[in-house]
Amino acid sequence: MTSNVMISADSDAALLRTLAGSRMGGASLPTADELGQCVRPFLPVLFALADRAGVADREAAVFAMLDEVQHWCHCWESTGLPARAWVVGMAQKRLRQYQLSNQH
């Protein structure tokens, strides 16, 4: 199975493509509801990461992770990773940065 086949079979791929389109300013920008539908499936795993990391303000941590995902989602397909694996990796990276910036 090639990586292109794996990506097209990935149920989260369309969600990241919509996010990438919104970031790149495509001809038809998604509505707030459509963007919400794109991020909603990822929220449980992002909150679980924040909980596991023991961050004090988990909503702020999840927002930071989502911001990172949206900022870089246009690069996702070139990695060949399934969308959810890519999101988790980017979220973990941003969570580490978030934790370091909030240490006293």
Image: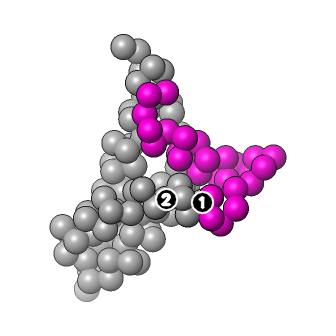
Indicate the colouring scheme.
one colour
Number of numbered discs visible in the structure rendering: 2
Q: Which residue is mark 2?
A: 39
The amino acid type found where label 1 is placed reads Leu
What segment carries the magenta color?
8-34
Q: Position of residue 44 (x, y in %)?
A: 32, 62
Residue in the image at 55% along x and 63% along y: 36
Q: Amino acid at mark 2?
A: Val
- How crowded pointer 2 is (Cα within 10 Å; few <14, some 14-19, many 20+) is rated as some
The question of residue 48 being in magenta is answered with no
Residue at 70%, 62% (x, y): give it: 31
Estimate how packed mark 1 is, as few (under 14), some (14 to 19) or many (20 or more) residues with alpha carbons within 10 Å: some
Q: Does the image show residue 6? A: yes
Q: Check the picture and name the quadrant holding the N terminus.
A: top left
Q: Any mark on residue 35, and which?
A: 1
Q: Residue at x 48, y 54 (%)?
A: 69
| Of the pair 2 and 69, the residue shown nearer to us | 2
In the rendered image, residue 27, in percent from the top left (x then y), is placed at: 81, 46
Q: Is residue 18 magenta?
A: yes
Q: Position of residue 20 (x, y in %)?
A: 61, 47
State the SS at label 1. Answer: helix
The quadrant the C terminus occupies is bottom left
* CB within 8 Å, label 2 to label 1: yes
Q: From what the image shows, is residue 103 above or below residue 78?
A: below
